[in-house]
Image (cartoon, helix red, strand yellow):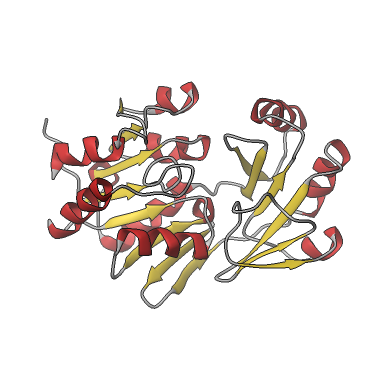
């Protein structure tokens, strides 16, 4: 193969770590092999900045650039510096969703610190500082990201609801649970990575990206080589150039060792 990665973009949950946020030593060693080869590693995740830095600490990386909040926030570290943000008015979309899921928990990102929330999320799902507010307060100003979390619905029901409502003016992603991420229209991990690649002078064709979720579809399609984790939904696998092992079997290690 003539492809050689000049930038490696890695999703976090379901890719670098399992659902208990555990990372194996093999994953850490494989990522450090990339870094030691002089290739930038870009953590690219739906997590907000505190969650990004948790992954960076887990990887034991000293510095770099990361794509956070599904592309709405780009940071450099260390120290953490916000390089770019994109915001949108989420008020009408949130109110529309709450008409259909009135008991949902809603979270709005506070860049760099955590979230403002209308009610508590399941333990461990959000990182950083949490501040309780009313819905009107949450969406009074443009935001980078909104999370809608329903305790009583499945991921499939959330996909159907989002498709039925259309959610104009936003990008949206449904997770493995009834978790709906709202992002500014046109913003994705791919748009964030494109900015990072331009900043570093690296061509799209030379980017290797690995991920497992519906919010990775644009990134895997955009990258010169997009690789889906083995547990990925069919929608994600279909947009990838290849499929690796599951997170339980260190799929990211299998792929990285092909090149480094």
**Which percent across, then down, holds residue 94?**
79, 48
> Residue at 23% across / 46% down in the picture?
26
Give the quarter of the image for residue 195.
bottom left
| Total numbered labels | 0
- Say which quadrant the C terminus sits in: top left
**Which percent across, then down, holds residue 214?**
52, 34
> Residue at 16% across / 40% down in the picture?
257
Give the quarter of the image for residue 48.
bottom right
Residue 123 located left or right of residue 207: right
> Residue at 79% across / 56% down in the picture?
119
- Say which quadrant the N terminus sits in: top left
Note whether 237 is above or below 197 in the view shown: above
Residue 257 located left or right of residue 115: left
**Which percent across, then down, holds residue 258?**
15, 36
Give the residue furthest to the bottom. 79
Note whether 83 is above or below 249 in the view shown: below
Q: Nearer the viewer, residue 103 or 137?
A: 103
Q: Nearer the viewer, residue 223 or 117?
A: 117
Note whether 120 is above or below 227 in the view shown: below
Give the quarter of the image for residue 179.
top right
> Residue at 26% across / 53% down in the picture?
28
């Amino acid at each position: 193969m003539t492809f050689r990665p000049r930038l490696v973009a890695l999703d976090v949950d379901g890719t670098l770590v399992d659902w208990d946020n555990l990372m194996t030593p093999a994953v850490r060693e494989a990522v450090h092999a990339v870094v030691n080869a002089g290739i930038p590693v870009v953590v690219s995740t739906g997590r907000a900045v505190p969650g990004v830095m948790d992954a960076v600490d887990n990887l034991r990386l000293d510095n770099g650039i990361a794509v956070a909040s599904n592309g709405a926030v780009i940071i450099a570290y260390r120290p953490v510096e916000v390089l770019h943000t994109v915001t949108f008015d989420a008020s009408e979309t949130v109110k529309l969703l709450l008409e259909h899921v009135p008991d949902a928990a809603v979270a709005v990102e506070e860049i760099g610190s955590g979230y403002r929330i209308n009610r508590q999320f399941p333990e461990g799902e959000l990182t950083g500082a949490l501040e309780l507010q009313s819905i009107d307060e949450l969406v009074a100003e443009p935001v980078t990201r909104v999370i809608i979390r329903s305790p009583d619905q499945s991921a499939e029901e959330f996909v159907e609801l989002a498709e039925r409502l259309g959610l104009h003016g936003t990008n949206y992603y449904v997770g493995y649970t009834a978790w709906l991420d709202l992002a500014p229209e046109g913003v994705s991990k791919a748009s964030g990575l494109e900015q990072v690649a331009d900043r570093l002078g690296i061509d799209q064709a030379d980017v290797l990206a690995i991920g497992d979720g519906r919010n990775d579809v644009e990134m895997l399609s955009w990258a010169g080589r997009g690789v889906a984790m083995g547990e990925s939904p069919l929608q994600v696998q279909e947009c990838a150039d290849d499929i690796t092992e599951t997170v339980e079997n260190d799929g990211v290690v299998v792929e990285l060792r092909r090149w480094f």
